[in-house]
Image (tube, rainbow, N blue to C red):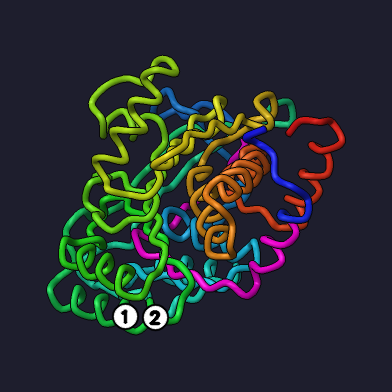
Amino acid sequence: MKGYIEKARFEAITSRFPRTRLLVVGDAIADEFLVGEPSRISREAPVLILKHKNSEIIPGGAGNAAANAASLGGRVDLLGAVGQDLSCDRLREALEVRGVGTKLLLPDPSRPTTTKTRISAHSQQSVTQQIVRIDKECHLDLSPELEARAIAFLEAAIPEVDAVLVSDYGNGVLTKRIVERLGSLCLEHHKKLTVDSQAGLGRFPHASVITPNQPEAEAAVGYKIEDRESLLRAGADLLSLSGAEAALITRGANGIALFERSETSEVPAFNRSEVFDVTGAGDTVIATFTLALAAGATFLEATVLANLAASIVVRRFGTATTTVAEMAETYRRLSEKAAF
C-alpha cells in the first residue's frame, strides 16, 4: 500500500534525524496568538470586549518549518530577515527555545519582523475560535548589502548541511540573485533542495522537490484539480514547469499525491475525522519530508512520514510541531488498526 512504511525502515530513518543537518532559507514569521474570553459588548461600537487570558509568539513560515525539523531531532539553522523590533526579539527567543539556530538571521532596520497576530476567543462552553488576524509585513526585496550577506552565508553553510529547505512566502528574502546562487550551490555540492513557495514554483530551476498545496498547484498550472485525471495532469505539468525530480501536492482530507518522473503515488490522509486546525500543516509536511530525505528515505518513504507527522499537528490549535516519539506512537496505533 502507498501509505505504508515498514517498521524497520521507520526506525532506521528516524534514528538518523539527530545526525542530520538542515538549512532552512526563507521568510521567518512571528505567529502571535492572543486569546481572550468574551466579557461584554462595547459601548463604543457593536463589538465584543475580550478579557485577555494569554498570548505567545510561535515561529511561523520558514521559522515553523525549522521548528518542526528541530522538534524531530534535526540540527537546523534558519537563514532569513527580521526587523529590529520587539517581535524580532520574541521570535529569536521562540526559535532558540525550540532548538533552531538563529545566527544566520539578518537584521534589517528598514522592515518590520513579519508578524501575524491571531486574536481568538473561548469560553468554558466552547473551543477556542479565531476572530480576526492582523498581518504586519514587508514585501520589498532585501537591499543589495543584505543580499550579499545572505549569499555569503549560503556559500559557507551549504557545503556543511545534508539538505536545504526553502520556505517562500513572498516577503522579499528570496530575491532572484539569492535563488540563483542557492540553486547553483545545491547543484555544485549535491544537496537536495526542497521548495515550498507561495510566490512562484517556477522560480527554483534546481529544486529537487516542490511541495505546493492543492490551491497553489492549481494556480501554478492554471486549472482546477477536480478528479484523478486532472490530478495526474497537474502533477505532470508541475514537473515540467519546475524541472524538479518530484512534486508533492498536499490535498487536505484527500491526503498527499507524490509525482516522480516515472511513478505517481497517492497517500491517503490518516485522520480525516480528527482535524482541528490546519495552520502550519504544510510547514510540517516539508520539514518532515526534507529531514527524512536527508536521512536516507526514498521520496515515497519521506512522503509517508510527512503525512504521518501532519496527521498529528492538525489535531492541535495553532502552529504546532511533533516529535519522533509521537510519530512512533501514532505509527503503532495505525498499524494495530491496519490503517496503513
Which residue is situated farthest in the top direction here?
227
Q: Is residue 18 magenta?
A: yes
Q: Is residue 168 above or below residue 94?
A: above
In the picture, measured across the screen, residue 77 lies left or right of residue 288, that is left
Magenta-colored span? 11-38
- Magenta segment's dominant SS is strand
Query: Which is more N-terminal, label 2 or label 1?
Result: 1
User: Mark 1–mark 2 contact, CB under 8 Å?
Assistant: no
Assess whether residue 137 is covered by the magenta stretch: no
Q: Which residue is mark 1?
A: 153
Instruction: Classify 10 Å Cα crowding around label 1: few (below 14), some (14-19), many (20 and above).
Output: some
Name the residue: 59% across, 65% down. Answer: 295
- The residue closer to the viewer here, 120 or 94, is 94
- How many marks can you see? 2
Task: Give the residue type that dot 1 points to.
Answer: Phe
Residue type (three-letter) at the residue carrying disc 2: Pro
